[in-house]
Amino acid sequence: MAEEAFGEAGTGRLRMAVQKKGRLADETFDLLKRCGLSLSQSKNRLYARVQEMPIDILLVRDDDIPALVAGGASDLGIVGGNVFEEERAGGRLGSRVPLVKPLGFSKCRLCIALPKEDTYSQPADLGGMRIATSYPALTEDWLEREGVKGATTVVMNGAHEIAPRLGVADAVCDIVSTGGTLDANGLKVAETIYRSEALLIGGPLEGEAKKVADALQLRIEGVQRSRDAKYVMLNAPRSAVEAISKVLPAADKPTILELAGTAEKVAVHTVCREAVVWEHLEELKRLGASAILVLDIDKMLA
Ligand code: PRP
Ligand code: ZN
């Protein structure tokens, strides 16, 4: 594969920036795979080419993605909301703020945390504190909105959690996922200031680029729709079909199939969220449902 071909104008290939490595990267590559897209990587691992669609993937650090897209160097990007909003709040996207579509994965919270022994009841308690963070713009915006007096940010690019013990800060503002890192460092959440998930950013696009981006979005939506949905099959008395359809609400009416050798029982096939099946399992059994099968759906295209 020719290295120089990436992002060349006029090749008609859409450019999309994604994180090179990390948790977001893993989940992004998983999404692309579930969209039926396979990547061939360049030798220098700076970009990858999608085999099935005219898309080139630029592999970069996540904090560079918003500016690459806003500046037009990349048509689209997949980036954490935390990073995108920090770049926007920091005024680094200029006037061309791209469109945003939430993708529903890589969910986490941006939290202000304090040593466990500190008492905390309200934002004013943070007054005068030094807060270690790599999200100074989001943190300062929040402090201002909450009217916290005299608090300042100390920018650190990692290991925020040890800042209070080192004495370089009184609090931290960092990403919390499971909470394990805070706990291990003797810290507790005081406030959640932003809820983050992965975003597809970019556009508005025109012409061929728009066509490719729309086709990609259609595939992503198919994957999103199928994420919580399950294909449910069960056998039930014919007389209970209506009651069972009410218990398992779906976009469409269920499919009812004859069972060999009996007129009283039928097979019911439907699509619904997995949680619904768990919540109503007892009720389904009470209505006479048997042989309940819950199957994964790979994609749901419309
Ligand atoms: C993030 C964040 C915390 C940790 C939180 O760091 O900065 O340190 O994850 O996760 P937890 O609540 O599940 O413990 P990451 O590992 O992404 O690396 P970084 O700090 O170098 O960005
Ligand atoms: Zn960290």
Image (tube, rainbow, N blue to C red):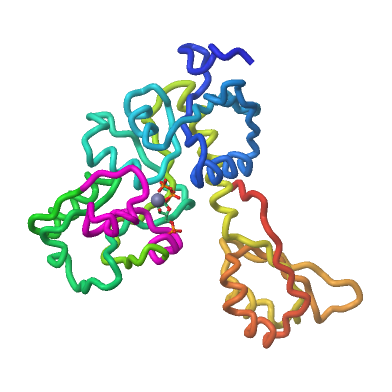
User: Quick check: 172 above or below 67?
Assistant: below
Q: Position of residue 189 (x, y in %)?
A: 31, 66
Q: Residue at x 58, y 65 (%)?
A: 273
Which one is in front, 119 or 57? 119
Q: Position of residue 1 (x, y in %)?
A: 64, 16
Q: Residue at x 71, y 82 (%)?
A: 239
Q: Position of residue 196 (x, y in %)?
A: 37, 52
User: Quick check: 47 above or below 292?
Assistant: above
Which one is in front, 31 or 162? 162
Residue that protrudes farthest toward the left in the picture = 149
Q: Residue at x 27, y 66 (%)?
A: 190
Magenta highlight on residue 248: no
Q: Would residue 147 be visible to someone looking at this image?
A: no
Q: Quadrant of residue 137?
A: top left
User: Quick check: 292 above or below 90?
Assistant: below
Q: Position of residue 42 (x, y in %)?
A: 60, 22
Q: Is residue 142 left or right of residue 178?
A: left
* Segment colored magenta: 154-183
Q: Quadrant of residue 187?
A: bottom left
